[in-house]
Image: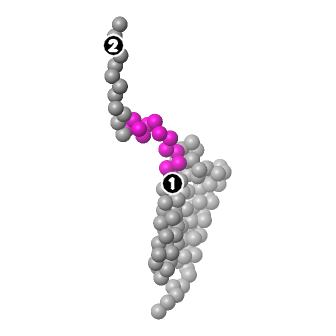
Amino acid sequence: MMPPMPPTRPTPRDWLRTRDLHNLPVLLVLACAAGGLGYSAAVPEHWRRGVLVMASAMIMAGFFRLVLPARQSGLLTVRSRVADVLCYAGVGAAIWLIALALPAVGP
């Protein structure tokens, strides 16, 4: 009979394999959107930059939904893949264009 093997320490790679990281894309999108919102609130004279960052977060959500399988895209999966990508990218592009089209106010 063989003696029991001593327990091994898990490596960071083992930790990543065992953890469920399917919500990481939505966390990145939310962090980007929150950063844009915070920048717009903290520096109101440069609100356009914050709005462009938030629009970029929407476009990033569409990219994640396009390249990731449904199981890994987590909370970004709402409808079919085509509908999600069109909605995320369309809203992001529309916000981007509107932010660039609005005239700057101030001296």
Task: Find residue 13 and report its image quarter.
Answer: top left
Q: How is the image coloured?
A: one colour
Q: Position of residue 50 (x, y in %)?
A: 49, 72
Near-viewer residue (36 or 103): 36
Q: Is residue 59 visible?
A: no
User: Which residue is depicted at the point 34% across and 28% down?
Assistant: 8
**Residue 48 image offset from top left, x and y in percent:** 50, 77
Secondary structure mostly taken by the magenta-highlighted segment of the chain: helix
Q: Write the residue at 60% across / 64% down.
A: 90
Q: Which residue is mark 2?
A: 3
Q: Earlier in the sequence, mark 1 or mark 2?
A: 2
Residue 79 shown left or right of residue 72 in the figure: right
Q: Residues within 10 Å of mark 1 (few under 14, many from 20)?
A: some
Instruction: Find the magenta span and give its range.
Output: 13-25
Residue 38 lies in the magenta-colored region: no
Residue tagged 1: 27
Q: Camera-side residue: 64 or 9?
A: 9
Q: Which secondary structure, mark 1?
A: helix
In the image, 107: left or right of 70?
left
Residue lying at 54% horizontally and 85% vertically, measured from the top left: 103
Q: Nearer the viewer, mark 1 or mark 2?
A: 2
Mark 1: which amino acid?
Answer: Leu
* Real-space CA distance between mark 1 and mark 2, rounded to the nearest whole angstrom: 45 Å
The image quadrant that residue 62 belongs to is bottom right
Q: Position of residue 70 (x, y in %)?
A: 58, 44
List x then y, in percent, for residue 61. Answer: 54, 57
Judging depth in this view, the residue of 49 and 97 nearest the camera is 49
Can you say whether 95 is above or below 19 in the image?
A: below
Q: Identity of the amino acid at label 2? A: Pro
- In the image, 80 versus 18, the foreground residue is 18
Q: Assess whether residue 14 is covered by the magenta stretch.
A: yes
Q: Is residue 27 visible?
A: yes
